[in-house]
Amino acid sequence: MIDFAPIAQWLADFGSSIPHITFNMKSLVLPQPFQPDEQEYQESMIFLAVLPFVYLIFVMVLLMIFYCCVDFTTSQEGDEKKRCCNWSASFYSISHVVLLLSSLFALYGVIMICIPSMEKINKSAEKFISEMVDINLIPKTIDSINSQLEAKSEEIDSISTKDEQFKRAVESLEAQLNKDTFMMDNLFFGSALDQTKSVKTITLWTSAGLFSLFAVVAIFSKISVCAKSKNMLIGVTCVSFFAMVLCYLSLTIQLPAAVAFSDYCKSPKDSQYSIVRMPDCESDEQLSKLNGALENLKVIDTGLSDHPSIDTDSTLTELRNGVRRIMFFGESVKAMLDCDNVKEEYAKITEAICTDSDTPFIVGWWAVLASSLLVSVFIVTTLLIAPCAWRNYDPHNDYGESGYDKGGDEFLPLNRPSHFQQPSYPPARQDGHLTLPSYLCHSSDDLILDRPPNYASFS
């Protein structure tokens, strides 16, 4: 098994060293942590995405000029011209072999590295989000508890007059039971799991389908060369134009994403805040507030349970149940503040992206990007060489040979003379009579030109 960890580290260093240019042509300080919320970082990623699109326009203009304005005929004759087209056909075949190998390499990166890595990421993300569900519900629960405390203030006051400990617990809880104590804004993006699934479903499988198309184009190109079929070569060239556009459009996503993954893996701690905001694991003050609130809630729960009307008054029963719910959620917050589960699951996500020795996502993604770059270069090369390859397999080329002389359809050339000759007619008599063969008429007298026509023959 290949150890991908050193390769992943090298890719993180390499990708993070790529210049990050903003719209103002300002270069950001490198290495730049992954900060998708920052405007300058967003501009640098958009700038990287625009580069393949601009190059696509340049290539399309170049090919348009080449196909429309360049004369593919040549003034050279004989063996030199033949060697030129044979060399072009050979390079055409080699380029498609490179396309096929690049496509297979990209498919290996997607299927064998990226998809298993995404499975690990999704599994850890699901556990991580499940840990945060209770915390996200705490603010609404606190509002509900406070409203119930206010609605039953008279009953609570009556209990407080009889139970001094209950009174102190209620007074302390008024300062402790608020959103700021329990609320942790943006602990994890709520759509993070959906985003990772979208990346897997759309980006990875789209890349797999795209490189499958490149592989099919390369295979059919080899078949057309082996079959010496000019029509099939032209068809493959038409499909190659479509594949070239898709390749460059895919680079607009693959290039900035690869750099973003490298930025994250280069400094995961600095990039953490843009993805997940952990609770303050080191704050003793926060823990002490939480522990104090939980103790006061226990006292209130005991006081409500001992109230004589607890079984008959539905409002008190709902209040006690609400207090118990907030106690349960408070215990969940306390567990999260210990950061054991959070750190473990987040570390698994980072490992699956950056440092996994078996299937690091960054290695698979860069494999897809490298393959796309190779395909973008060699597919343009094949489009430039294709017209000469057509001529090499033209059944009526200028070499005096047929591309189908060893099999396949046979084309019979037209034996046209080099110059036209005047037609020859039978000599006419001086006396105005035309001599024709005897089998064409019974008598030569019938062809005397000055004899009047016999109209009776038409009756």
Image: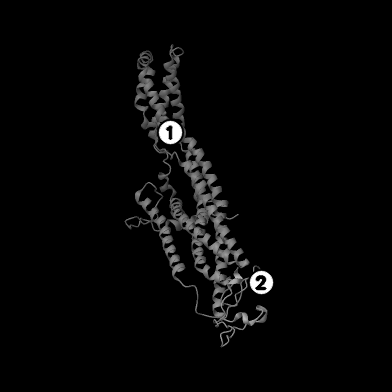
Vertical comparison of 400 with 181: above or below: below
Vertical comparison of 173 with 423: above or below: above
Q: Number of callouts in the render?
A: 2
Q: Is residue 25 left or right of residue 190?
A: left
Q: Amino acid at mark 1?
A: Asn
- Which residue appears at 38% of the width and 34% of the height? 285
Q: Position of residue 409 (x, y in %)?
A: 64, 68
Vertical comparison of 409 with 149: above or below: below
Res. 229 in view: yes
Q: Label 1's element?
A: helix
Q: Amino acid at mark 2?
A: Lys
Q: Position of residue 382 (x, y in %)?
A: 52, 66
For label 1, the crowd category at 10 Å Cα-Cα, with few meaning under 14, some 14 to 19 and many 20 or more, is: many
**Quarter occupied by residue 298:** top left
Could you say which is closer to the camera, residue 428 or residue 459? Answer: 459
For label 2, the crowd category at 10 Å Cα-Cα, with few meaning under 14, some 14 to 19 and many 20 or more, is: few
**Quarter occupied by residue 295:** top left
User: Closer to the camera: disc 2 or disc 1?
Assistant: 2
Res. 372 in view: no
Q: Label 2's element?
A: loop
Q: Quadrant of the N terminus?
A: bottom right
Disc 2 or 1, which lies upstream in sequence? 1
Q: Which residue is mark 1?
A: 136
- Which residue appears at 49% of the width and 57% of the height? 247
Disc 2 to disc 1, C-alpha distance: 75 Å
Q: Is residue 264 left or right of residue 115?
A: left
Could you say which is closer to the camera, residue 422 or residue 400? Answer: 422
* Residue 406: assigned label: 2
Residue most toward the left? 24
